[in-house]
Amino acid sequence: MNIFTGVESSELFGGQVPPPVQRLIDSARSGTPDEAGAALWTAVLTFPRCLPPYYLLYKFHASRGEMDAAHEVARKALAAAALQAHLAADWRAVQPGDADFSTPGPARFWLFTLKALAFINVRRGERAAALALVVKLRALDPADRIGFGVVEALLAQS
């Protein structure tokens, strides 16, 4: 998936981004790292219901080794997606029948972000937090369609 270009983004997020958000994403893609970060933060803060910029922003910070910032953005993304998917604000309260996590849209994005949060916690050295997230992912996605097995493998190595 190339969220910067929008290719296949609908598979995860359930649709294209509004033109003003796409312009900010394009700006992030063509700018310096500082400009990219500023453009993505602008997108998240200006369009808080638009989910793709959250993904880009937590990936941006994670790729730079800024795990605390990535964690902050992933938590914001989880909250925004939970609100849109009508899920509990506390991820621990979400149950398998609360949403259809297999179809594109906010619930699937929420599940994907839960996986990202687990990965970020591994990278932050917060093994117990990552493990708790993986346990929840296993309950919500027993077939592992979202790919949490990668995080599980990282936990097994440490």
Image (tube, rainbow, N blue to C red):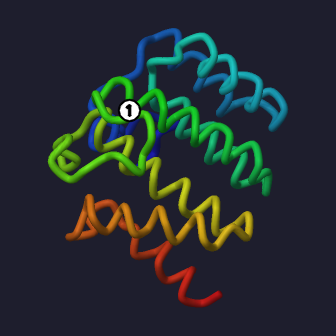
Q: Is residue 14 left or right of residue 43?
A: left
* Crowding at mark 1 (Cα within 10 Å: few <14, some 14-19, many 20+): many
Residue 129 in picture, x, y percent from top left: 59, 64
Residue 139 in picture, x, y percent from top left: 27, 65
Question: Which quadrant of the view contains residue 56?
Answer: top right
Examine the rendered structure and indicate whether residue 145 appears above or below residue 8.
below
Examine the rendered structure and indicate whether residue 68 appears above or below residue 40.
below
- Which of the image's four quarters has the C terminus? bottom right
Disc 1 secondary structure class: helix
- Kindly identify which residue carries mark 1: 82
Q: Residue furthest bottom?
A: 157
Q: Residue furthest front?
A: 93
Three-letter amino acid code of the residue under disc 1: Ala
Q: Is residue 41 left or right of residue 82?
A: right
Residue 29 in picture, x, y percent from top left: 65, 33
Identify the residue at image location x=56%, y=80%: 154
Question: Which quadrant of the view contains residue 157?
Answer: bottom right
Q: Nearer the viewer, residue 95 or 154?
A: 95
Examine the rendered structure and indicate whether residue 98 appears above or below residue 128.
above
Question: Which quadrant of the view contains residue 8?
Answer: top left
Q: How many marks?
A: 1
Q: Is residue 53 left or right of residue 65?
A: left
Q: Nearer the viewer, residue 134 or 63?
A: 134
Identify the residue at image location x=69%, y=53%: 62
Identify the residue at image location x=56%, y=16%: 23
Q: Nearer the viewer, residue 143 or 28?
A: 143
